[in-house]
Every structure is written in C-alpha cells, then in structure tokens.
Amino acid sequence: MNNFINNFYKNQALFYKVFLFILTAVLIVYLMPKGGKFKYEITKGKPWQYENLYAPFDFAILKTDDEIVREKDQIISNHIAYFNYDQSIAESVKAEAEEQINEIFSDSIINRRGSAIVNFSESVIDEVYEYGVQQEDNQLEDDQPVYLKRGNIAEEIPLGRIFSQDEIPEYLSTNIDRSNLTDFKPELLELFYNVIEPNVTFDASFTQKELDSKLNAISYTRGSIERGTIIISKGEIVEGVKLDILNSLKQEYESQLWSQSSYSWILFGYSLLVSLALLMLLLFIRKYRRDIYENNVKITFIFFNILLMVFLTTLVANFEARYVYIVPLAILPLTLKAFFDSRLGLFTHVITVLILGFVVPNSYEYMFLQIIAGIVTILTVSELYKRANLFISVGQITSVYIIVYFAFTVIQEGNILDLDSEIFLTFVLGGLATLFVQPLIYIYEKLFGLVSDMSLLELSDTNSRLLKELSEKAPGTFHHSLNVANLAEAAANEIGANSMLVRVGALYHDIGKMENPTYFSENQTSSVNSHDELSPTESSEIIIGHVITGIEIAKRNNLPDRVIDFIRTHHGTSTVYFFYMKEKQQNETALAADFRYPGPIPFSKETAILMMCDSVEAASKSLKEPTTAKINDFVEKIINKQMEEEQFLNANITFKEIQLIKKILKQKLKNIFHLRVEYPE
C-alpha cells in the first residue's frame, strides 16, 4: 500500500495527464453526432471515384430541402380560408326590420306604400345575407376563393360575394336609387343602418388546422430504390438525380447503422479516433515542447480550448449546420500563439479541425477551409498586442474564407449563380467574432495564470508603479536594468528567443535591491562604502539576499511567474567571488558554498540570455580605457566562466546561439563606450 501511495505521489503529474486525456476524449465523444458515418465521400459535380455502387438495401429517395420548401409554399399559397356563416343573425335582422318599419315610417306612409316598403326591405336583406356580411376586413383578394360554412356544409365561393361593412352603404344607396322608393331614401337608409349586422367571421383555428393537415401530409420521398440496383458507376458525375439518390442512401445508411444495436461499436470507433488525435497532440508536445508538457496547467489550458471549440461548433451545427462558420475557430491558433508559439498553435488547430470533421456536414470542404484559415492566422499575426495587426489579420482570414467558398461553389455548381449570400454573412460574422480574442486572452491570463505578449507590453512600461519605485529608491540599479534590457532584447532577437519576455525580465530582475540600495555599487554616490563596516560573510548575505527579496516584492505586486523566474535565475548558482576571496584572505577554511547564490540555474533561452547580459553589463563598469580587444576578451572571459560552471546546462541553448549572443554583446558594448578607429597623426 505504501509503495502504491509513493508511486502515486511520484507520478501524480502523469496520472493527472492521463485523467485529463480520458476526460477530454469522453466529453468530445459525447458531443459527437449520434449516428454512424457514411463510408463514401459525396462531392457534388465531381466524378465518382469509387467502384460501382449497388443499393445494399431497399430505401426511399428523399426529396431535397428546396423541393420540400417549394411544396410547402405552394400549399400555403393555394390554401383556402374558412369563414363561418351565422344563420340566426340573418333571421333576427329580418324580424327586426319589420318592427323598425312601424317605428320609422308614419301611418299614412305605411297605409299607402307599406307593402312595397316591406317587400323592398326583405329583398335587400335577402341579397345582403345571401353570403353574409364580414365582421372584420382581411388581406385576401376579392377573387380569391374561400369556404363559407353553413352548419356542416362548406360552399366554395369568391371572397367578393361576401359583403364587407364598408360596401354596405354604397350598395344600399344604389338599390334605393333604382327602386320607386327614392322619396323615402333617408328613412330606408336609417332602417337598414339600424338592423344590418355582420354575420360572417373568419375561422382561423379551423383554417390553420386544415393547413397543418395538408402540410403534414406532404411526402418527403419520391420513389424508391430496390436492393441490388446500381446507383452510380465509377467515373459518373455526381449531380442531379444521382446526387439525390446518394444523399438518400447516406441518410438511410447512417440512421440504420445507429439503430441496429451498433451503439457501443460506433462509440468505440469515435473514441479510438478522438483518442488517437489527442494522443498525437500530446506526443508532439512531449517531444518538441517539453517545458509545456511538464506543466499541467498549460496542458489543461490547451485541452480546454480544444474542448471549447468542439462544444461551440457542435452547438451551432445542431441548431443550424449552415452557420458553423460563425464559430471563430481562428481564435484557437491565435490564443495558443499568444501564450506559446506558432508551431504548437497550428498543430493544435489542425488536430481540432480533424476532430470537427465528424461533426460538420461537407467535412472535406470544412477542413480544407479551416486549415487554410489557420495557416493564414499564424502567418499574418506577428504582434498580437498591436490592434492594427489583429484587424488586418481578421480581414485576411475573412477573405480566405470567402475565396475558398467561392472556389468550392464554382467546382460543385459550375457557375456563380448558386452562391449563397447568407454564407458570406456567416464568414463576416465569424471574422468579427475573432476580435474577441483580446478580451479572451485577458480572461485566460487570470484563470490559468499565463502571460501573453499584451501583458508583457504593459509590464515593460517604465512608468509602472514598481519600476518608478525602483528608479526612486535605487536609480543606479534602474539604469543598470535598462541597459541590461536593451542588451538582452538585442541578443534575443539575434537567436529567435522571446525578446519581449526577456526585456521585461531584465527590467524587474534586480527589484530586490530596493531593500538595501546603498549596499550595491551602482547606487553608491559617495566615497563611503556600506560594506566597510560589515564582514565579508554579512556582505555576501545582503548581496545574495536581493534575489529572495526580489521574489517577495514581485509576488506582493502580482508579477507573473514567468517574470519571477528571471529574478530567481539571473545569478544561477554562481559565487559572490569578491567577498569570498576577501573572506579567504582572513580565513583559509572559508567555503565557497557559503558565498553561493541558491539558484536555480537558468532553464530557458531567455533566462540564460539575462544571466549573460546582466553579468557583462555589471562588470563592464570596471573596464579601464576599453578597447575592441579588451571588450572581446572581457565578454569571452565572463561567459566562458559561466559555461564552465555549467550555468546553462538546463537552458536548452546551443553553442552556436551562445556565440551569436557574445557577438551582439561585443557590438553593443563597443557602441556604449563609443569606440572608433584610431587615425594616425
């Protein structure tokens, strides 16, 4: 049991990676579409590259989405609305008219023309209520047919036969003018206005029910293919009916494959492929980015980003597959490039696109487009902290999307008439969404404790509070840090290291000297030396202590770990040689270990560069009457001594790169000391 616990603690980083690997693979497989994968790639407009294909089973030919939409539109446009006719209102209007005649007309008129008035009113009311009066206006045309329901009987008539309330006044006036009762027009109009009421209403619920019934009755198939029938021969162009049949076979194949107790096997297949893709990424990181592989936070960050992109793409694909390009997949290589490097960003992007090929339709087109866009992203964005660069890159990414989509459409359709403007809009929206990378990088910095070039740019500002404090308390150290930063940046550029990171590290590497600034020679402004009153051991403790003090100050001010690493390693395990030799003169038994910095030694190219530049710049102050030869020997001596002490053993830096750094330091020192050719007198 104890051995197991010891092994667990010893290999806990490896166990965590295995757990993270399995968890990521399981979540990605869970997000995969719940269906099998058709074993043939169907590309419209291209020859069939496989052998002759025969129907493996009976299946129906599915109509295309456009055909279904056209049928639905035709049904909706031809659908006839239903109106309800209320007979009771028509009968009550007749009864009401008889009563109103006696009230409106005088007895003398009724005695003389009563029968004529009654007959006229009855005939008018019969005509008005032959098809009734609408209760409300509608948007239908007068010649459009409608169904008028009287009880259980529906009669098809033109809508114009049903009176609208606006038509009633004109109709009544015209009929009165044509009769021999024009002398009683005001009374008759008053009569009809009082009694006529609408009795026809639009039956919206029944109309919609009938429409839904017709829409539900639409057949989504047209014909069928029997088992063994040849579907397409090798070399035939995939288009027209052949394309429809192939798509129908694909859909039926995938649905049958998923339903025929193959669930576990399909999941197993997905798991193998996803695991293989993630394993390739892990092996790449382990072989070429060992420092990242050994950092579980960074591995978690990479896997989290892959999972995030798969989740977003799956979400959009399930909602509407044609909008998958709205997902800003270019954010992935941009983010990884900002925190790590271009190679890792591109490799991770390719692995993610390969996984997404199982999720999206037209997988070849999608993968081709996204991989090209990822390459463009890596090549175009050189300095992400410059906003103009990001906008230019977004424009280039969007242009690549549009160009590739245009090319695929021309290949598949043979013309440009079938270009979909909505797809262009998704490319633009996806490009604009890529601009979210800057706030996303800030969020990642806070969540994962990583450092991007944008944060380094902010830290390099000499007007920041901590650097201002350094310039006030230890102006000599501040000036020394500026000189080291310039030397280190030039050296980093020469060997292709992270110049921004090494510059920031150089600016902050000596902040521990703020604690006791006068004990460091660059801050001593008088002839009095504070070390004269101390023993060599005490002096060395103060000198060595500035590293620990610097780390504490950096942590109090929330400096990133990548910057604190420069404070830890800028002296490595070197010896405070001056005070060691001084103690040696007084005590021959003095040990060099008591005068040695605690380390660690530099473990990256950037920290190694800082150690070289710091030592060279500090020691250059002791040069008397510098010449080119003196400077060359001086630089060689300091850096060779560091190499002899094995200070760069863990720094992953080559002899060639060290030689290049020496060359840069020599050139820079010559410029600092303003050396020039001596002309003969």
Image: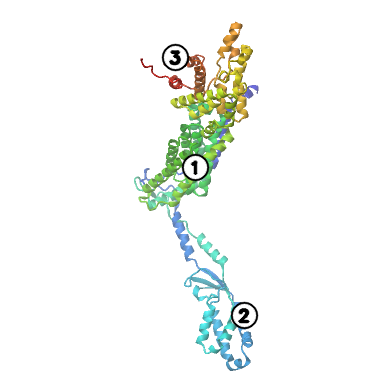
Q: Nearer the viewer, residue 464 or 561?
A: 464
**Which residue is the site of mark 3?**
630
For the question of whether residue 267 can be seen, the reply is no
Location of the N terminus by quadrant is top right
Give the crowd class for mark 1: few <14, some 14-19, many >=20 residues within 10 Å.
many
Provide the secondary structure element on which disc 3 rests. Answer: helix
* Residue 434 disc label: 1
User: Which circle, 3 or 1, is nearer the viewer?
Assistant: 3
Q: In this view, does 162 lie to the left or right of 6?
A: left
Residue sitting at the far left = 235
Mark 2 lies on a secondary structure that is: helix
Label 1 and label 2: CA atoms lie apart by 71 Å
Answer few, some or many: residues within 10 Å of disc 2's Cα (few below 14, many 20 plus, some between 14 and 19): few
Q: For residue 92, which numbered disc appears in the image?
A: 2
As shown in the figure, which amino acid type bears the numbered disc 3? Answer: Lys
Which of the two discs, 3 and 1, labels the residue nearer the N terminus?
1
Furthest residue toward right: 1
**Residue 396 occupies which quadrant of the picture?**
top left
Q: In this view, does 396 lie to the left or right of 520?
A: left
